[in-house]
Amino acid sequence: MKALEGVRILDMTHVQSGPTCTQLLAWFGADVIKVERPGVGDATRGQLRDVPDADSLYFTMLNHNKRSMTLNTKDEKGKEVFTRLIETCDVMVENFAPGALDRMGFSWERIQEINPRMIYASVKGFGPGPYSECKVYENVAQCAGGAASTTGFLDGPPLVTGAQIGDSGTGLHLALGIVTALYQREHSGRGQRVLASMQDGVLNLCRVKLRDQQRLAHGPLKEYSQFGEGIPFADATPRAGNDSGGGQPGRILKCKGWEQDANAYTYFITQAAVWEKICDVIGRPEWKEDPDFATPPARLPRLNEVFEAIEHWTMTKTKYEVMEICNPLDIPVGPILSMQELSEEPSLRETGTIVEVDHPTRGKYLTVGNPVKLSDSPSEVSRSPLLGEHTREILQDVLGYSEEEVSGLREAGAVGREDCATT
């Protein structure tokens, strides 16, 4: 059995944060029924489209292992179908604008009446408070959650990161909340609401910066580069460039070929436990006994000099040679890997972290697989559904509609006409 086999998810999500959550649940074996508008579907089906008349990678890479049905939830018969879905499913996940489901007539109180065991999970931009009604996108979440103010270099503007910590990060948080609520339901017998706000999710991932905010009250952050450069600290956690942030000084350094290759760099951490080995590797054995460099406190004001010397050495090696030399010595380093390099890495294919999927209209493409590996429940990635591909199947096999009733729903416009045509 799959870990979540037997759990049925009513997926009312779109774009990225919600679909990330429901895709993860589908990878673990849940039956995820994605409900989409007839003839339109999830907006991302057509966004950033690279192959004409085919679902975009934006959609396909966020909706694997799901079934799609179309449903007009504004139609009275469509609402009847939606009610039966609520009765049948264990979890409903949505990331609509605040109040959207209430206006449809499906408030949390109404959902509890229909199915007291239903877990109702939502992604919102902000939690309760002055901004709860605001619309939020990825970069807005990164800014409002504290990530942007602490990302970038001290002499530059705030920066967002390429990692989708606002959307996909919040989807991961919501998935944890859902499985936790499912576990509690085994004891209580009751469903409950699960809320993950994007601001909260980003802030949770920025906890070390909140840590540093409090440390500022007791003096300068000595492991930050600006301390060694004599730049005073202000009242808020500053941008720290590529400093480690973990108490062990680290930076991104140039490697051989950096003039032509934008990713010929390595991350190098001067961990105290291996400092003497670092001195030997970079050809500075005298620093092992020099009082200006022998101890971590002595090195903090001199980090620029330390990393300049290390970079002088790394520039003579490729980023992979740096790894080959340093890893056996337990010196923490890591190459800057591009998306191209990651997509071509055989080990990531072997573990299912990156998989190739065949799609009926766009052909083969690469996507990420389940990042969480279970020994007794391996994940298999199946293609994303075509719009309304499983409408008839769900109406008949899940909800128990007869052939005649399905035809009636189709004629009434409650579901997409083409989606329920006899195959």
Image: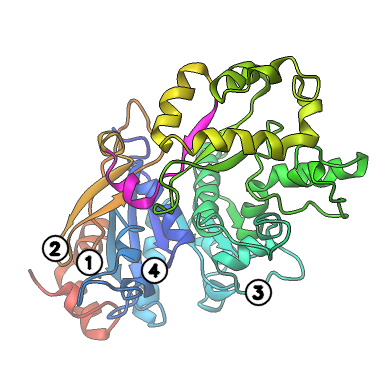
Residue 340: say if magenta: yes
Q: Are marks 2 and 1 in contact (CB under 8 Å)?
A: yes
Q: From the viewer's perspective, is the residue at label 2 or at label 1 nearer?
A: 2
Q: Which residue is mark 1?
A: 386
Q: Are marks 3 and 1 in contact (CB under 8 Å)?
A: no
Q: Which residue is mark 3?
A: 134
Which residue is at 23% across, 67% downward? Answer: 391
In this view of the protein, which residue sits in the foreground, 367 or 386?
367
Mark 4 or mark 3: which comes first in sequence? 4
Tell me the quarter of the image containing the C terminus. bottom left
Mark 2 or mark 3: which comes first in sequence? 3
Name the amino acid type tagged 2. Pro
Q: Give the distance between the C-alpha atoms of the residues marked 4 and 3, in whole angstroms.
A: 27 Å
Q: Which residue is mark 2?
A: 360
Name the amino acid type tagged 4. Phe
Mark 2 or mark 1: which comes first in sequence? 2
Query: Pointer 3: residues within 10 angstroms few (<14), some, or many (20+)?
Result: few
